[in-house]
């Protein structure tokens, strides 16, 4: 997220551009991870799932590289005002991107197990959730490069929809488990997958807050939407 203003020291501008390039690379890999993990569970493709897990090493390596780069910039350039916000924001964003990569890898690992299991029910709910999560992730990664506070706010507000869908999936899977104990193993994996997708949405929201602050110099002036109610869910068995 480079500052668009020119600096007296041109090498400083080059460093900001380099930082932006590293974050773009990391965002691209993470976005691909989530897309491939989604494909892996819906198509029951263990080979694609394995690639997602392998790509997590690249994400971790980029996080370490960016962290070292930011620390060096803070020490040598001593940025102020907008530049300082941008550089600190880059450090926070990479942390969230790394966690998204971890969750995508977790989804892929569950997908490998599910590819070997019989599923007596539809994955349409999970499929819908993957679409919403990928849309938000693409929007927020684009917003990083474009310094788009409006797009960040859009992602921040839309997280409620993902949470609502997660609550629905949670209840459905618990019901399947109660109706037939043979569903417990598959449903348990799907519960973890749904939760990992929900957490990816949360980290996209974290990035949205960081972008908004970096661009505007103020926090989003609204209460954060949060609709995950699974901890309070009461699921009753169907009556015969």
Image: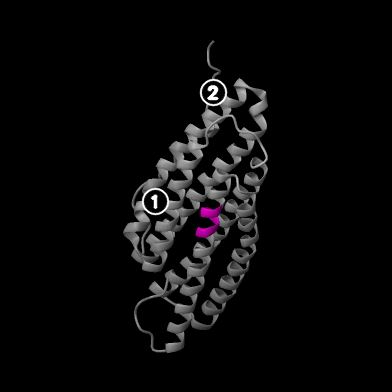
Pointer 1 residue: 156
* Quadrant in the picture for residue 160: top left
Colour scheme in the image? one colour
Residue 214 spot, x, y in % from top left:
40, 65
Q: Are marks 1 and 2 in contact (CB under 8 Å)?
A: no
Identify the residue at horizontal 34%, vertical 57% (top origin). Answer: 151
Q: Position of residue 135 (x, y in %)?
A: 41, 52
Measured as percent of width and height from the top left, residue 145 is found at 40, 68
Q: How many marks?
A: 2
Residue 197, can we see it? yes
Measuring 65% from the left and 63% from the top, which residue is drawn there? Answer: 57
Can you say which quadrant of the picture contains the N terminus?
bottom left
Residue position marked by numbered label 2 in the rendering: 235
Magenta range is: 31-36
Q: Residue furthest left?
A: 150
Prevailing SS of the magenta stretch: helix
Question: In the structure shown, which secondary structural element does the residue marked by tag 2 occupy?
Answer: loop
| Of the image marks 1 and 2, the number of the one nearer the N terminus | 1
**Is 45 contained in the magenta span?**
no
Q: Residue furthest top?
A: 240
Query: From what the image shows, is residue 86 above or below residue 190?
Result: below
Neighbour class for label 1 at 10 Å: few (<14), some, many (≥20)?
many
Tell me if residue 238 comes above or below residue 172 in the rendering: above
SS at circle 1: helix
Which quadrant holds residue 227? top left
Where's residue 202, x and y in %?
Answer: 48, 49
In the image: residue 87, left or right of residue 153: right
Residue at image location 62% in from the left, 64% down from the top? 60
């Amino acid at each position: 997220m480079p500052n668009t203003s020119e600096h007296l020291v041109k090498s400083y501008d080059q460093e900001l551009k380099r930082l932006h390039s590293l974050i773009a690379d990391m965002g691209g890999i993470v976005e691909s991870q989530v897309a491939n993990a989604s494909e892996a569970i819906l198509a029951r493709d263990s080979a694609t799932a394995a690639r997602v897990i392998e790509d997590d090493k690249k994400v971790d390596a980029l996080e370490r590289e960016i962290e070292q780069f930011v620390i060096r910039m803070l020490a040598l350039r001593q940025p102020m005002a907008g530049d300082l916000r941008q550089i600190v924001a880059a450090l926070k964003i990479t942390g969230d991107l790394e966690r998204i990569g971890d969750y995508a890898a977790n989804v892929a690992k569950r997908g490998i197990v599910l590819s070997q299991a019989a599923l007596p029910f539809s994955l349409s709910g999970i499929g819908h959730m993957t679409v919403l999560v990928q849309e938000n992730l693409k929007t927020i990664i684009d917003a990083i490069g474009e310094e788009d506070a409006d797009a960040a706010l859009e992602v921040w507000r839309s997280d409620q929809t993902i949470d609502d869908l997660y609550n629905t999936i949670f209840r459905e899977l618990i019901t399947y488990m109660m109706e037939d104990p043979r569903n417990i193993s598959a449903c348990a994996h799907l519960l973890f997958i749904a939760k990992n997708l929900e957490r990816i949405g949360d980290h996209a929201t974290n990035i949205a807050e960081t972008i908004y602050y970096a661009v505007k110099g103020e926090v989003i002036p609204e209460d954060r939407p949060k609709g995950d109610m699974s901890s309070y869910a009461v699921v009753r068995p169907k009556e015969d």
